[in-house]
Amino acid sequence: MTIVNDNEFKAALNALPPDQQRMVAARFAENVLSVSQDPRVTSALQAAKRADITEPELAAAFHAARSASVASYTSCSKEADRQHQASHFVAKAALNSVMPAAHGANRAWEAALNARMARAIASGVASDNSETQQQYRILSGFLTVMANRLPG
Amino acid sequence: MSASFERGYNLLKEMIDAPIASYLASCVRCGMCASACLFFTETNDPKYTPIHKIEPLRKVWRREYTLTGKLASWLGLVKPLTDEDLANWQELLYDSCTLCGRCSMVCPVGNDIAYMVRKSREGMAIAGHAPAGVIAATKRTLEIGSPMGVRLPAVKVQINHVEQETGLEVPLDKEGAEYMVLLSSMEIINFPEYLSAIARIFHQAGKSWTICSEAFEATNSGIQIGVGDFAREIVMRIVKGAEKLKVKTVISPECGHAFTALRWDGPNLIGRPYTFKVQHILEVLDELRIAGKLKTAGFEAGRLTYHDPCQIARRGGVVEQPRNLLKMVAQDFVEMSDAGTMNWCCGGGGGVSANSDADDIRLQAFKRKKAQLDELGPVTLVTACANCRITLEEGLEHNQMDVPVVGLTETIAAHLLESPQFSPPRSQAGEGLGEREKP
């Protein structure tokens, strides 16, 4: 399946069951992981990518990602640093991926948005939409893998 | 006597206008202000009694403006104010006061203690006794236009992001627009969901709006540090931008001190009335609601409560509007004890969150908010100030509390009845946001 625009992208994400939304959300976040140095984010994403993750593991990953997200805010009147700011959005994307399914949002879409923000901030170019194209490829690949795993 | 101390002393002397002189003369030393200050209630340390925080100002008043003080000074019966006194009071005037104004509300003789703290800060800053973080923020504001050093390219990154997300135009420098939207640095750096919500709400309401490339920043650190000249320059930048674009209304964002600076202090700072109206975003949203231009569907499934930002509710009078708006999207809305004009501060306003010296006392003060939330049980916390939001999130994280915190504007936007082409699966609103019933 080839995805070429956000409408197709959103539609495909909306069609995914919650566990697959989590796994693909983690892949979106992982794709911008190079701008984060926080081991809590890395560990949360490793957990989120696993199909066999347990509820306690998911809860632990959620708390780790939330902790990283809160810690990476730029506080009021502190000098903004682009890399630090970008790392916050990576943490937010990771947090989206491990958010409990009961929260009702399409966490994969939110993770995608935060990952795009992280990339654009890190590059410093307002019109940098490169991450969007990469996310289309990530989702296409993910859907292909999932389709091949289905019986029959 | 050092030159900086002399300048600070003289400025403190200048700051004592008729209201301050009457406040100082009428203080009955009852100590009621102590029970209203979360830095006192959460530590029980008498040095945090609000009226004690302005002791340097009181000393100057007594020595310079009262007969008994002059006599006592002449006879050598009282010690003069020293540079060391000011150094010792930095902690009390900056680290442990958010200018929340709760003390002013309970003073039985009507003294505006928060006003006196602000005036005291003017002398402190000139004497070189302001926290380094707050001084640096003010310098950035003057040099760059933003206390966090945010420049226009960073705003453009967010504009592009929001346009991609929503499919809507974010107008820049659109002359003749009805509304000029200001952002706080916090929103530019941390919360793109605010601008996204604005774009979607004004699209639905059919209102014209714009961001001004020369005055996009609302935060006024001149007010926080207590330097009137800086505060004036920051306000003037916004005035020039609004007048150049000929807008009818300037919207102050989800930022407390920005609202105080622009709405209440601004005309006095620049010495003339504005040619435009200034409203807080919650006032604008409530007007749209009344006009039937804010249409929502569905309700938040969980329990919601609202944290009143001090400068918006207590100092700004915006109390009913957020509740009117929340009732549109919440079936289970509950109030914290002391909600509204007497709400307890988050503990991070007035430059406290910009001041790393205050990190420990800020977390201690958060115990009050924790107690308020513990009374309610599981709840989502809505607020309308980006600084409150981060201070609350940090306090909650420090106390390992599972309470999601979200902005009010984005919460409303998440329930907008929108045409499908502009409707994302859901806004970016607050990770951890309570479950929503589908519209």
Image (spheres, helix red, strand yellow):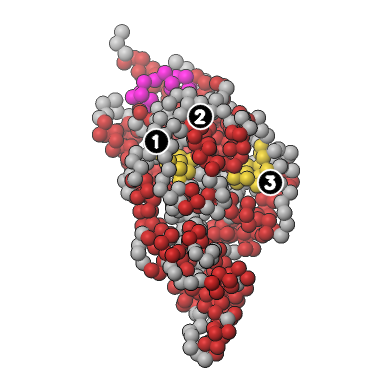
Looking at the image, is B156 positioned above or below residue B262?
Answer: above
Q: Mark 3 points at which residue?
A: B277
Tell whether B162 sits left or right of A72.
Answer: right
Magenta segment main secondary structure: helix
Classify residue B92 by image quadrant.
bottom left
Question: Which numbered disc, 3 or 1, marks the residue closer to the eye?
Answer: 1
Residue neighbourhood size for the residue with mark 2, other residues' Cα within 10 Å, grouped as few (<14), some (14–19), many (≥20): many
Residue B279 x, y percent position in the rendering: 63, 45
B34 and B97: which one is in front?
A: B34
Q: Residue at x 64, y 63 (%)?
A: B229
Looking at the image, is B285 positioned above or below residue B37?
Answer: above
Tell whether B421 sits left or right of B215.
Answer: left
Question: Element under label 3?
Answer: strand
Q: What stretch is highlighted in magenta?
A: A9-22
Residue A68 x, y percent position in the rendering: 37, 44
Who comes first in sequence, dot 3 or dot 1? 3
Who comes first in sequence, dot 2 or dot 1? 1
Q: Name the residue under label 2.
A: B415
B335 and B209: which one is in front?
A: B335
**Amino acid type of the residue tagged 1 in the rendering:** Arg
Q: Name the residue under label 1.
A: B303
Residue neighbourhood size for the residue with mark 1, other residues' Cα within 10 Å, grouped as few (<14), some (14–19), many (≥20): some
Residue B82 magenta:
no
